[in-house]
Amino acid sequence: MSGKAYLYENVSHHLRQHIHEGSYRAGEKLPSVRVLSRLFQVSVNTILQCFRQLEADGLIHRIPRSGVIVTPNLSEQKPVDVTRTPVPLLPVEVSLSQEILRYMEPYVSHSMTRFGIALPGTEIMPVERVMQEFRGVTRSDGLATWHYAHPRGEEVFIHQLARRSLNYPVPVTEQDVLVTNGCMEAIELALRVVTKPGDAVAIETPTYYGTLVALEVLGRKALPIPTDPHQGIRLAELEQAMRRGQVSACIVSANAQNPLGFSMPTENREKLARLAGRYKVPVIENDIWGDTVFGEAQLPIKAFDHVGEVIYCNSFSKSLMPGMRLGWIAPGRFLHRVLELKQVSNITTASAPQLVMARLMESGFYHQHLQQLRTHLQCQTRELMALSRQYFPVGTRINEPSGGCVLWLELPDAVDAGRLFDCALKQQIHIFPGRVFSPAGRHTHCLRLNAGSPVTPDIAAAVRKLGVLAHQQLT
Protein backbone atom coordinates (compact mmCIF):
# COMPACT_ATOMS: atom_id res chain seq x y z
CA MET A 1 0.00 0.00 0.00
CA SER A 2 1.32 3.47 -0.87
CA GLY A 3 2.31 6.09 1.69
CA LYS A 4 -0.78 8.16 1.04
CA ALA A 5 -3.33 8.32 3.85
CA TYR A 6 -6.66 6.92 2.67
CA LEU A 7 -9.89 8.86 3.15
CA TYR A 8 -12.63 7.19 5.14
CA GLU A 9 -14.62 6.59 1.92
CA ASN A 10 -11.68 4.63 0.48
CA VAL A 11 -11.24 2.59 3.65
CA SER A 12 -14.97 1.84 3.81
CA HIS A 13 -14.92 0.71 0.18
CA HIS A 14 -12.00 -1.65 0.84
CA LEU A 15 -13.63 -3.18 3.90
CA ARG A 16 -16.99 -3.52 2.15
CA GLN A 17 -15.34 -5.23 -0.82
CA HIS A 18 -13.50 -7.73 1.39
CA ILE A 19 -16.75 -8.56 3.23
CA HIS A 20 -18.78 -9.10 0.06
CA GLU A 21 -16.03 -11.19 -1.54
CA GLY A 22 -15.83 -13.44 1.53
CA SER A 23 -12.44 -12.45 2.89
CA TYR A 24 -14.32 -11.80 6.11
CA ARG A 25 -17.33 -14.10 6.45
CA ALA A 26 -20.49 -13.70 8.50
CA GLY A 27 -19.68 -13.97 12.20
CA GLU A 28 -15.95 -13.33 11.76
CA LYS A 29 -14.23 -10.50 13.56
CA LEU A 30 -12.66 -7.57 11.69
CA PRO A 31 -9.19 -6.34 12.71
CA SER A 32 -9.10 -3.89 15.62
CA VAL A 33 -9.39 -0.13 15.21
CA ARG A 34 -5.70 0.38 15.90
CA VAL A 35 -4.60 -2.35 13.51
CA LEU A 36 -6.70 -0.85 10.71
CA SER A 37 -5.47 2.64 11.60
CA ARG A 38 -1.86 1.52 11.08
CA LEU A 39 -2.70 -0.53 7.98
CA PHE A 40 -4.48 2.28 6.13
CA GLN A 41 -2.33 5.05 7.65
CA VAL A 42 -5.29 7.04 8.93
CA SER A 43 -6.42 8.23 12.36
CA VAL A 44 -8.38 6.11 14.82
CA ASN A 45 -11.28 8.54 14.36
CA THR A 46 -11.32 7.78 10.63
CA ILE A 47 -11.61 4.02 11.28
CA LEU A 48 -14.40 4.61 13.80
CA GLN A 49 -16.19 6.68 11.16
CA CYS A 50 -15.85 3.79 8.68
CA PHE A 51 -17.30 1.37 11.23
CA ARG A 52 -20.27 3.67 11.78
CA GLN A 53 -20.92 3.76 8.05
CA LEU A 54 -20.65 -0.03 7.64
CA GLU A 55 -22.87 -0.56 10.67
CA ALA A 56 -25.49 1.79 9.25
CA ASP A 57 -25.34 -0.27 6.03
CA GLY A 58 -26.00 -3.45 8.03
CA LEU A 59 -22.68 -5.08 7.17
CA ILE A 60 -21.21 -5.20 10.67
CA HIS A 61 -22.24 -4.92 14.30
CA ARG A 62 -20.20 -4.07 17.35
CA ILE A 63 -20.18 -6.28 20.43
CA PRO A 64 -18.87 -4.69 23.65
CA ARG A 65 -15.46 -6.08 24.66
CA SER A 66 -15.56 -8.48 21.71
CA GLY A 67 -14.90 -6.24 18.72
CA VAL A 68 -16.55 -5.72 15.36
CA ILE A 69 -18.30 -8.73 13.83
CA VAL A 70 -19.48 -9.26 10.25
CA THR A 71 -23.28 -9.47 10.22
CA PRO A 72 -24.81 -12.94 9.58
CA ASN A 73 -26.94 -13.74 6.49
CA LEU A 74 -24.88 -11.53 4.22
CA SER A 75 -25.87 -13.69 1.27
CA GLU A 76 -29.37 -12.25 1.49
CA GLN A 77 -28.14 -8.66 1.45
CA LYS A 78 -27.51 -6.64 -1.68
CA PRO A 79 -24.42 -4.48 -2.04
CA VAL A 80 -25.13 -0.94 -0.88
CA ASP A 81 -25.07 1.94 -3.36
CA VAL A 82 -22.58 4.12 -1.53
CA THR A 83 -23.35 7.10 -3.77
CA ARG A 84 -26.90 7.25 -2.35
CA THR A 85 -26.42 6.11 1.24
CA PRO A 86 -26.09 8.89 3.84
CA VAL A 87 -22.69 8.66 5.51
CA PRO A 88 -22.59 9.17 9.29
CA LEU A 89 -19.78 11.67 9.83
CA LEU A 90 -17.57 11.88 12.91
CA PRO A 91 -16.23 15.11 14.50
CA VAL A 92 -12.47 15.22 15.03
CA GLU A 93 -10.15 17.13 17.32
CA VAL A 94 -7.96 19.78 15.68
CA SER A 95 -4.27 19.90 16.60
CA LEU A 96 -2.42 21.62 13.78
CA SER A 97 -1.34 24.98 15.20
CA GLN A 98 2.32 24.07 15.77
CA GLU A 99 2.63 22.46 12.35
CA ILE A 100 0.98 25.44 10.65
CA LEU A 101 3.30 27.84 12.49
CA ARG A 102 6.30 25.89 11.21
CA TYR A 103 5.06 26.19 7.64
CA MET A 104 4.28 29.92 8.01
CA GLU A 105 7.53 31.15 9.59
CA PRO A 106 9.75 31.11 6.46
CA TYR A 107 7.44 33.66 4.80
CA VAL A 108 9.12 36.52 6.69
CA SER A 109 12.36 35.96 4.78
CA HIS A 110 12.55 38.38 1.86
CA SER A 111 15.05 36.12 0.10
CA MET A 112 12.32 33.51 -0.45
CA THR A 113 10.22 33.01 -3.55
CA ARG A 114 6.87 33.33 -1.80
CA PHE A 115 4.35 30.75 -2.96
CA GLY A 116 3.22 29.94 0.59
CA ILE A 117 1.02 32.77 1.89
CA ALA A 118 -2.13 33.64 -0.08
CA LEU A 119 -1.80 37.34 -0.80
CA PRO A 120 -1.74 39.63 -3.85
CA GLY A 121 1.70 41.19 -4.34
CA THR A 122 2.39 44.85 -3.73
CA GLU A 123 3.39 45.09 -7.41
CA ILE A 124 -0.30 45.10 -8.38
CA MET A 125 -1.57 47.19 -5.46
CA PRO A 126 -2.11 51.01 -5.34
CA VAL A 127 0.35 51.47 -2.49
CA GLU A 128 1.07 55.17 -3.06
CA ARG A 129 -2.60 56.13 -3.36
CA VAL A 130 -3.48 54.38 -0.11
CA MET A 131 -0.53 56.01 1.69
CA GLN A 132 -1.66 59.36 0.30
CA GLU A 133 -5.10 58.84 1.83
CA PHE A 134 -3.54 57.96 5.18
CA ARG A 135 -1.58 61.19 5.14
CA GLY A 136 -4.70 63.12 4.15
CA VAL A 137 -6.81 61.62 6.92
CA THR A 138 -4.26 62.36 9.64
CA ARG A 139 -3.98 65.97 8.42
CA SER A 140 -7.69 66.72 8.08
CA ASP A 141 -9.16 64.45 10.79
CA GLY A 142 -6.33 64.23 13.29
CA LEU A 143 -8.54 64.18 16.38
CA ALA A 144 -10.85 61.57 14.86
CA THR A 145 -7.90 59.21 14.46
CA TRP A 146 -6.68 60.06 17.98
CA HIS A 147 -9.74 58.95 19.94
CA TYR A 148 -11.54 55.62 20.30
CA ALA A 149 -14.03 54.90 17.57
CA HIS A 150 -17.53 53.77 18.51
CA PRO A 151 -17.45 50.02 19.35
CA ARG A 152 -19.46 49.34 16.18
CA GLY A 153 -17.04 51.40 14.07
CA GLU A 154 -16.80 54.78 12.36
CA GLU A 155 -20.17 55.90 11.02
CA VAL A 156 -18.87 56.97 7.60
CA PHE A 157 -17.21 53.58 7.08
CA ILE A 158 -20.21 51.55 8.23
CA HIS A 159 -22.36 53.59 5.87
CA GLN A 160 -20.18 52.52 2.94
CA LEU A 161 -20.25 48.89 4.04
CA ALA A 162 -24.04 48.85 4.21
CA ARG A 163 -24.26 50.30 0.68
CA ARG A 164 -22.49 47.19 -0.64
CA SER A 165 -25.72 45.24 -0.05
CA LEU A 166 -27.84 47.46 -2.28
CA ASN A 167 -28.72 44.55 -4.61
CA TYR A 168 -29.18 41.90 -1.91
CA PRO A 169 -32.63 40.30 -1.65
CA VAL A 170 -32.16 40.81 2.12
CA PRO A 171 -30.09 44.02 2.53
CA VAL A 172 -27.57 44.57 5.33
CA THR A 173 -28.27 47.83 7.15
CA GLU A 174 -25.90 50.07 9.07
CA GLN A 175 -27.38 48.69 12.29
CA ASP A 176 -26.36 45.17 11.23
CA VAL A 177 -22.61 45.85 10.92
CA LEU A 178 -19.71 45.83 13.38
CA VAL A 179 -16.10 46.64 12.40
CA THR A 180 -13.37 44.16 13.39
CA ASN A 181 -9.60 43.77 13.30
CA GLY A 182 -9.53 41.68 10.15
CA CYS A 183 -11.65 38.74 9.06
CA MET A 184 -10.18 36.33 11.58
CA GLU A 185 -11.42 38.39 14.52
CA ALA A 186 -14.87 38.34 12.93
CA ILE A 187 -14.75 34.54 12.61
CA GLU A 188 -13.46 34.13 16.16
CA LEU A 189 -16.22 36.35 17.55
CA ALA A 190 -18.80 34.37 15.60
CA LEU A 191 -17.49 31.04 16.91
CA ARG A 192 -17.44 32.29 20.50
CA VAL A 193 -21.03 33.48 20.23
CA VAL A 194 -22.69 30.45 18.61
CA THR A 195 -20.59 27.56 19.97
CA LYS A 196 -19.03 26.45 23.23
CA PRO A 197 -15.93 24.33 23.99
CA GLY A 198 -16.41 20.76 22.81
CA ASP A 199 -19.00 21.65 20.16
CA ALA A 200 -18.54 20.41 16.60
CA VAL A 201 -18.43 22.84 13.67
CA ALA A 202 -19.03 21.69 10.09
CA ILE A 203 -16.24 22.72 7.72
CA GLU A 204 -15.35 22.28 4.07
CA THR A 205 -12.56 19.85 3.28
CA PRO A 206 -10.03 21.04 2.38
CA THR A 207 -10.52 24.35 4.15
CA TYR A 208 -8.49 27.42 5.10
CA TYR A 209 -5.98 26.47 7.79
CA GLY A 210 -6.74 29.63 9.78
CA THR A 211 -10.23 28.25 10.40
CA LEU A 212 -8.69 25.08 11.83
CA VAL A 213 -6.40 27.06 14.13
CA ALA A 214 -9.36 29.07 15.41
CA LEU A 215 -11.26 25.87 16.18
CA GLU A 216 -8.25 24.40 17.97
CA VAL A 217 -7.54 27.48 20.07
CA LEU A 218 -11.21 27.79 21.07
CA GLY A 219 -11.51 24.09 21.92
CA ARG A 220 -14.05 23.25 19.21
CA LYS A 221 -14.13 20.08 17.12
CA ALA A 222 -14.30 19.97 13.34
CA LEU A 223 -16.74 17.93 11.27
CA PRO A 224 -15.23 17.77 7.76
CA ILE A 225 -17.93 17.66 5.10
CA PRO A 226 -17.03 16.35 1.61
CA THR A 227 -16.56 19.33 -0.70
CA ASP A 228 -16.85 19.37 -4.47
CA PRO A 229 -14.09 21.42 -6.18
CA HIS A 230 -16.71 23.10 -8.40
CA GLN A 231 -19.99 23.08 -6.46
CA GLY A 232 -18.70 23.54 -2.92
CA ILE A 233 -19.69 21.83 0.32
CA ARG A 234 -22.05 18.90 -0.23
CA LEU A 235 -25.35 20.13 1.10
CA ALA A 236 -26.89 16.66 1.47
CA GLU A 237 -24.20 15.57 3.94
CA LEU A 238 -24.30 18.96 5.67
CA GLU A 239 -28.08 18.77 6.07
CA GLN A 240 -27.71 15.26 7.49
CA ALA A 241 -25.31 16.57 10.14
CA MET A 242 -27.65 19.46 10.93
CA ARG A 243 -30.69 17.19 11.16
CA ARG A 244 -28.87 14.77 13.49
CA GLY A 245 -27.81 17.65 15.74
CA GLN A 246 -24.13 16.83 15.18
CA VAL A 247 -23.01 20.44 14.65
CA SER A 248 -23.57 23.75 16.38
CA ALA A 249 -22.43 25.85 13.43
CA CYS A 250 -20.95 25.69 9.95
CA ILE A 251 -18.09 27.69 8.38
CA VAL A 252 -18.04 28.06 4.59
CA SER A 253 -16.69 30.27 1.81
CA ALA A 254 -18.96 30.74 -1.17
CA ASN A 255 -16.62 32.93 -3.24
CA ALA A 256 -13.17 31.85 -4.49
CA GLN A 257 -12.81 29.37 -1.63
CA ASN A 258 -9.33 28.94 -0.19
CA PRO A 259 -7.67 26.61 -1.17
CA LEU A 260 -9.85 25.06 -3.92
CA GLY A 261 -10.77 28.34 -5.62
CA PHE A 262 -14.38 27.44 -6.52
CA SER A 263 -17.40 29.71 -6.22
CA MET A 264 -20.62 28.10 -5.04
CA PRO A 265 -23.58 28.21 -7.47
CA THR A 266 -26.26 30.71 -6.52
CA GLU A 267 -28.91 28.03 -5.97
CA ASN A 268 -26.62 26.32 -3.44
CA ARG A 269 -26.16 29.60 -1.57
CA GLU A 270 -29.90 30.08 -1.32
CA LYS A 271 -30.39 26.50 -0.17
CA LEU A 272 -27.67 26.80 2.48
CA ALA A 273 -29.30 29.96 3.88
CA ARG A 274 -32.62 28.06 4.07
CA LEU A 275 -30.95 25.10 5.81
CA ALA A 276 -29.48 27.40 8.44
CA GLY A 277 -32.92 28.81 9.14
CA ARG A 278 -34.69 25.46 9.11
CA TYR A 279 -32.35 23.71 11.54
CA LYS A 280 -31.27 26.79 13.52
CA VAL A 281 -27.62 26.03 12.82
CA PRO A 282 -25.74 29.31 12.19
CA VAL A 283 -23.64 29.56 9.03
CA ILE A 284 -20.44 31.59 9.43
CA GLU A 285 -19.62 32.90 5.96
CA ASN A 286 -15.97 33.77 5.29
CA ASP A 287 -16.13 36.04 2.23
CA ILE A 288 -12.62 37.44 2.37
CA TRP A 289 -11.99 36.62 -1.31
CA GLY A 290 -15.40 37.80 -2.51
CA ASP A 291 -14.13 41.06 -4.02
CA THR A 292 -11.59 39.18 -6.15
CA VAL A 293 -14.02 36.91 -8.05
CA PHE A 294 -13.27 37.06 -11.77
CA GLY A 295 -16.05 38.33 -14.00
CA GLU A 296 -19.42 39.20 -12.50
CA ALA A 297 -19.49 39.17 -8.71
CA GLN A 298 -22.02 36.85 -7.07
CA LEU A 299 -24.16 37.57 -4.06
CA PRO A 300 -22.95 36.06 -0.77
CA ILE A 301 -24.99 33.56 1.25
CA LYS A 302 -25.84 36.43 3.58
CA ALA A 303 -27.86 38.06 0.82
CA PHE A 304 -30.45 35.27 1.16
CA ASP A 305 -30.58 35.25 4.97
CA HIS A 306 -34.19 36.00 5.96
CA VAL A 307 -33.92 34.91 9.61
CA GLY A 308 -30.50 36.14 10.74
CA GLU A 309 -28.77 32.74 10.93
CA VAL A 310 -25.92 33.69 8.54
CA ILE A 311 -22.98 35.49 10.16
CA TYR A 312 -21.10 37.33 7.43
CA CYS A 313 -17.34 37.93 7.86
CA ASN A 314 -15.07 39.89 5.53
CA SER A 315 -12.07 42.21 5.37
CA PHE A 316 -9.90 44.22 2.98
CA SER A 317 -6.75 42.21 3.77
CA LYS A 318 -6.79 40.31 0.47
CA SER A 319 -8.29 42.96 -1.79
CA LEU A 320 -6.27 46.00 -0.71
CA MET A 321 -3.98 46.27 2.34
CA PRO A 322 -3.37 43.45 4.83
CA GLY A 323 -1.57 45.78 7.25
CA MET A 324 -4.76 47.79 7.85
CA ARG A 325 -6.25 44.76 9.66
CA LEU A 326 -9.67 46.11 8.71
CA GLY A 327 -12.61 43.74 8.64
CA TRP A 328 -16.27 43.61 9.54
CA ILE A 329 -19.02 41.28 10.62
CA ALA A 330 -22.77 41.24 9.99
CA PRO A 331 -23.91 38.83 12.73
CA GLY A 332 -27.63 38.74 12.04
CA ARG A 333 -29.63 37.92 15.16
CA PHE A 334 -26.41 37.52 17.19
CA LEU A 335 -25.39 41.19 16.92
CA HIS A 336 -25.89 42.14 20.58
CA ARG A 337 -23.77 39.27 21.89
CA VAL A 338 -21.02 39.88 19.29
CA LEU A 339 -20.89 43.54 20.32
CA GLU A 340 -20.51 42.54 23.98
CA LEU A 341 -17.60 40.21 23.20
CA LYS A 342 -15.96 42.82 20.96
CA GLN A 343 -16.01 45.39 23.76
CA VAL A 344 -14.53 42.91 26.23
CA SER A 345 -11.75 41.71 23.88
CA ASN A 346 -10.40 44.97 22.40
CA ILE A 347 -13.09 47.68 22.82
CA THR A 348 -12.98 48.91 19.24
CA THR A 349 -11.06 48.96 15.94
CA ALA A 350 -8.57 51.71 15.04
CA SER A 351 -10.17 54.79 13.48
CA ALA A 352 -7.59 55.76 10.87
CA PRO A 353 -7.93 52.69 8.61
CA GLN A 354 -11.73 53.03 8.72
CA LEU A 355 -11.62 56.68 7.67
CA VAL A 356 -9.13 55.93 4.91
CA MET A 357 -11.24 53.08 3.56
CA ALA A 358 -14.40 55.16 3.71
CA ARG A 359 -12.74 57.78 1.50
CA LEU A 360 -11.50 55.20 -1.00
CA MET A 361 -14.95 53.63 -1.26
CA GLU A 362 -16.90 56.89 -1.42
CA SER A 363 -14.70 58.31 -4.18
CA GLY A 364 -15.18 55.21 -6.34
CA PHE A 365 -11.46 54.46 -6.29
CA TYR A 366 -11.83 51.13 -4.54
CA HIS A 367 -14.30 49.92 -7.17
CA GLN A 368 -11.91 50.92 -9.97
CA HIS A 369 -9.05 49.19 -8.17
CA LEU A 370 -11.02 45.95 -7.97
CA GLN A 371 -11.56 45.90 -11.72
CA GLN A 372 -7.81 46.05 -12.28
CA LEU A 373 -7.01 43.65 -9.44
CA ARG A 374 -9.31 40.93 -10.80
CA THR A 375 -7.74 41.24 -14.25
CA HIS A 376 -4.23 40.93 -12.80
CA LEU A 377 -5.09 37.95 -10.60
CA GLN A 378 -6.88 36.07 -13.37
CA CYS A 379 -3.91 36.54 -15.71
CA GLN A 380 -1.40 35.51 -13.03
CA THR A 381 -3.28 32.40 -11.96
CA ARG A 382 -3.56 31.24 -15.58
CA GLU A 383 0.14 31.82 -16.19
CA LEU A 384 1.10 29.93 -13.04
CA MET A 385 -1.26 27.09 -14.01
CA ALA A 386 0.44 26.83 -17.39
CA LEU A 387 3.89 26.67 -15.78
CA SER A 388 2.71 24.08 -13.26
CA ARG A 389 1.30 21.87 -16.00
CA GLN A 390 4.58 22.18 -17.85
CA TYR A 391 6.93 21.30 -14.99
CA PHE A 392 5.05 19.13 -12.49
CA PRO A 393 4.76 15.34 -13.00
CA VAL A 394 2.21 13.81 -15.34
CA GLY A 395 -1.01 13.16 -13.46
CA THR A 396 -0.90 16.42 -11.51
CA ARG A 397 -4.38 17.94 -11.31
CA ILE A 398 -4.92 21.67 -10.86
CA ASN A 399 -8.18 23.37 -9.93
CA GLU A 400 -8.77 26.49 -12.01
CA PRO A 401 -9.88 29.15 -9.52
CA SER A 402 -12.89 31.40 -10.01
CA GLY A 403 -11.17 34.21 -8.14
CA GLY A 404 -8.46 34.94 -5.61
CA CYS A 405 -4.82 34.06 -6.18
CA VAL A 406 -4.23 30.46 -5.09
CA LEU A 407 -3.84 27.23 -7.02
CA TRP A 408 -4.57 23.82 -5.47
CA LEU A 409 -2.35 21.10 -6.94
CA GLU A 410 -3.06 17.40 -6.49
CA LEU A 411 0.22 15.64 -7.26
CA PRO A 412 0.63 11.90 -7.91
CA ASP A 413 -0.05 9.84 -4.78
CA ALA A 414 3.60 8.97 -4.21
CA VAL A 415 4.60 12.63 -3.76
CA ASP A 416 4.76 13.81 -0.15
CA ALA A 417 4.13 17.57 -0.07
CA GLY A 418 5.65 17.79 3.42
CA ARG A 419 8.96 16.48 2.11
CA LEU A 420 8.57 18.79 -0.88
CA PHE A 421 8.25 21.74 1.53
CA ASP A 422 11.53 20.86 3.25
CA CYS A 423 13.40 20.36 -0.02
CA ALA A 424 11.99 23.56 -1.52
CA LEU A 425 12.98 25.55 1.55
CA LYS A 426 16.61 24.60 0.98
CA GLN A 427 16.30 26.24 -2.43
CA GLN A 428 14.72 29.39 -0.98
CA ILE A 429 11.20 28.54 -2.15
CA HIS A 430 8.28 28.75 0.26
CA ILE A 431 5.17 26.62 -0.37
CA PHE A 432 2.28 25.34 1.77
CA PRO A 433 1.65 21.57 2.00
CA GLY A 434 -1.90 20.30 1.67
CA ARG A 435 -2.11 18.32 4.92
CA VAL A 436 -2.70 21.46 7.05
CA PHE A 437 -5.92 22.21 5.17
CA SER A 438 -7.65 19.26 6.86
CA PRO A 439 -7.96 18.39 10.57
CA ALA A 440 -7.39 14.71 9.78
CA GLY A 441 -4.07 15.29 7.99
CA ARG A 442 -5.40 14.40 4.55
CA HIS A 443 -4.22 15.80 1.22
CA THR A 444 -0.61 14.78 1.90
CA HIS A 445 0.08 14.73 -1.84
CA CYS A 446 -1.38 18.22 -2.40
CA LEU A 447 0.02 21.71 -2.15
CA ARG A 448 -1.22 25.27 -2.48
CA LEU A 449 0.63 27.86 -4.53
CA ASN A 450 0.14 31.63 -4.34
CA ALA A 451 -0.25 33.41 -7.68
CA GLY A 452 -0.50 36.88 -6.18
CA SER A 453 2.54 38.36 -7.94
CA PRO A 454 3.27 38.79 -11.65
CA VAL A 455 5.01 35.79 -13.19
CA THR A 456 8.64 36.85 -13.61
CA PRO A 457 11.57 34.74 -14.88
CA ASP A 458 12.52 34.12 -11.23
CA ILE A 459 9.06 32.78 -10.43
CA ALA A 460 9.08 30.61 -13.54
CA ALA A 461 12.46 29.21 -12.49
CA ALA A 462 11.13 28.48 -9.01
CA VAL A 463 8.17 26.53 -10.45
CA ARG A 464 10.58 24.52 -12.58
CA LYS A 465 12.65 23.70 -9.47
CA LEU A 466 9.51 22.58 -7.63
CA GLY A 467 8.65 20.35 -10.55
CA VAL A 468 12.11 18.78 -10.46
CA LEU A 469 11.80 18.12 -6.72
CA ALA A 470 8.40 16.50 -7.24
CA HIS A 471 9.79 14.28 -10.04
CA GLN A 472 12.64 13.17 -7.78
CA GLN A 473 10.14 11.62 -5.34
CA LEU A 474 8.79 9.45 -8.18
CA THR A 475 12.15 7.98 -9.15
Image (spheres, rainbow, N blue to C red):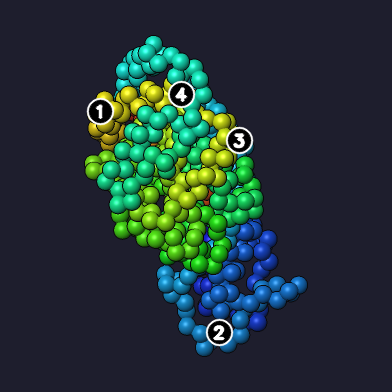
Residue at image mark 3: 344
Residue drawn 42% across and 56% down? 307
Q: Nearer the viewer, mark 3 or mark 2?
A: 3
The label on residue 427 is none
Asked if labels 4 and 3 touch by Cβ distance under 8 angstroms, the answer is no
Cα separation, mark 1 vs mark 4, equals 20 Å
- Label 2 residue SS: helix
The label on residue 364 is 1
Q: Which residue type does callout 1 highlight?
A: Gly
Cα separation, mark 1 vs mark 3, equals 35 Å
- Label 4 residue SS: helix
Left or right relative to 332: residue 265: left
Q: Which residue type does callout 2 highlight?
A: Leu
Q: Which residue type does callout 4 highlight?
A: Ser
The front one of 258 and 38 is: 258
Residue drawn 64% across and 47% down? 219
Residue 416: percent from left, percent from top: 51, 43
Would residue 234 be visible to someone looking at this image? no
Residue 205: percent from left, percent from top: 47, 52
| Label 2 CA crowd tier, 10 Å (few <14, some 14–19, many 20+) | some
Asked if labels 2 and 4 touch by Cβ distance under 8 angstroms, the answer is no
The label on residue 74 is 2
